[in-house]
Image (tube, helix red, strand yellow):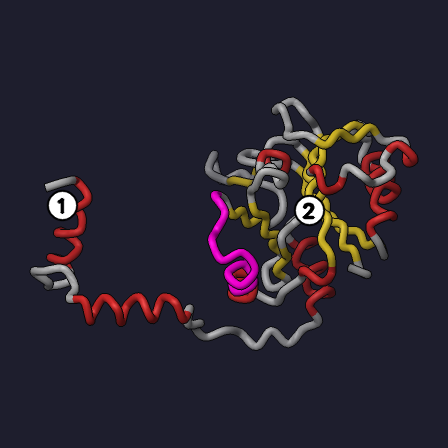
Amino acid sequence: MSARDRILERVRHALGRTEPLAAAQLDSVQAKLRIHPRGVLPTMQWEPLAQFRSRCLALASTFDEVPRLEAVPHAVAQYLSANELPRVAVCWPELAGLDWSGSGLAITARPTKGDDHVGITGAYCAIPETGTLMLLSGATTHAATSLLPETNIALVPASRVVRCMEDALDRLRSERGVLPRQVAFVSGPSRTADIEMTLVLGIHGPYRVHVILLTDL
């Protein structure tokens, strides 16, 4: 008996079963999983974009809005200058065509090597209920770019703002079908209070998260 078989046998024993599920029972379980039933949800009677901004700020992210993608380099330059951060960064390849140099920035489209201070990414979608960014790993959406640099600047089109986690997962299933290797949910800067109950930022991820909402996209 393999380790997997032993674990499943113990689970069955705890459930009062002696044998694996019959074929008809298994079909019923799989059918329910395919439906993705939702539990009880809050009313969420708020305007999504305003709620997203409010929750981001409550989680210690910073927030900005620009009308279109072409305005992003100027907004990024302003943010970096205001926080006395280097005007050098890495970005996802999809953002390489922006006029970064026109705003005095040196931005390279490549995966981070671990010593980059600023990483600029997009986001698959955003969740106003919790102020969360949902990022998918992939060949051109490098997960490390949002995790390793001290500062993550994330661009979020308004059209990718959904109401809640259930909406985000439904969109992922309908658009992608198969989950990517990694799905990251980012709710503000990384933090922990494990050591003497003192809150410390930037432990397992970025010290700063700056969200730029693209209102016309």
Helix, strand or loop at mark 2: loop
Magenta run includes residue 175: yes
Q: Quadrant of the C terminus?
A: bottom right
What label sits on residue 203 in the rendered view? none
The disc placed on residue 6 is: 1
**Which is nearer the N-term, disc 1 or disc 2?**
1
Identified at 69% across, 42% down, the residue is 121
Left or right, 58 with respect to 32, comes to right
Q: Quadrant of residue 116?
A: top right
- Where does the magenta region start and end? 170-181
Residue contact at pointers 1 and 2, CB within 8 angstroms: no
- For residue 208: magenta? no
Please name the amino acid that badge 1 sits on. Arg
- Disc 2 marks a residue whose amino acid type is Gly
Q: Position of residue 162 (x, y in %)?
A: 63, 65
Q: Is residue 211 visible?
A: yes
Question: In the rendering, which numbered label is found on residue 122?
Answer: 2
State which quarter of the image contains the N terminus.
top left
Question: Which residue is located at x 79 percent, y 27 percent?
Answer: 88
Q: CA distance from mark 1 to mark 2?
A: 43 Å
Q: Is residue 106 left or right of residue 10?
A: right
- Residue depicted at 81% across the width and 54% down the height: 65
In this rendered view, identify the residue nearer to me: 179 or 18.
Answer: 179
In percent of the image, x 14 and y 60: which residue is there?
20
The correct choice, above or below, for 108 with respect to 156 in the image is above
How far across and how far down the image is residue 114, in percent?
61, 24
Q: Secondary structure at mark 1?
A: helix
8 to the left or right of 113: left
